[in-house]
Image (cartoon, rainbow, N blue to C red):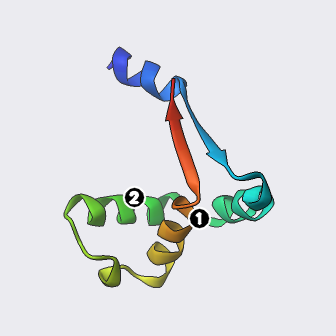
Amino acid sequence: MIQRRMAHLKTFFTVRRANFQQVAQNLTKISPAILDSLASKLEREHRFSDLAPAERNAMNLLKQVNTIAA
């Protein structure tokens, strides 16, 4: 449990400077429920075409974000 917490504390996102404003605004518009649903579907290896429009939008947005763990 402590190891998982430490991993989360040392993780951050990067975005290309040119896309930052748009990505930042759109990230705040995505609900946690949509991200949870998207994660569940991807864990079960659903195809991209099986996603709901809101999940597809979230996936496209997350493709622009890089996750870095220190």
- Quarter of the image for residue 48 reads bottom left
The residue at the point 52 percent across, 70 percent down is 60
- Sequence-earlier tag: 2 or 1: 1
In the figure, 51 relative to 67: above or below? below
Identify residue type, mark 1.
Answer: Ile
Spot the residue most to the top: 2
Spot the residue most to the left: 44
Residue 47, position in %: x, y? 27, 76
Q: Front-most of 43 and 66?
A: 66
- Quarter of the image for residue 13 reads top right
The residue at the point 69 percent across, 61 percent down is 23
Residue 28, position in %: x, y? 68, 59
The residue at the point 32 percent across, 20 percent down is 1
Q: Is there any visible trace of residue 35 in the rendered image? A: yes
Q: Is there any visible trace of residue 31 in the rendered image? A: no
Are there few (<14), some (14-19), or many (20+) residues within 10 Å of tag 2?
A: few
The residue at the point 74 percent across, 61 percent down is 19
Identify residue type, mark 2.
Answer: Asp
Residue tagged by mark 2? 36
Q: CA distance from mark 2 to mark 1?
A: 11 Å
Answer left or right for 45 relative to 67.
Answer: left
Q: Secondary structure at mark 2?
A: helix
In the figure, 41 relative to 66: above or below? below
Q: Secondary structure at mark 1?
A: loop
Residue tagged by mark 1? 30
Answer left or right for 7 relative to 46.
Answer: right
Residue 63, position in %: x, y? 51, 61
Q: How many numbered discs?
A: 2
The circle drawn on residue 19 is: none
Answer left or right for 25 relative to 27.
Answer: right
Are there few (<14), some (14-19), or many (20+) residues within 10 Å of tag 1?
A: some
Residue 15, position in %: x, y? 67, 50
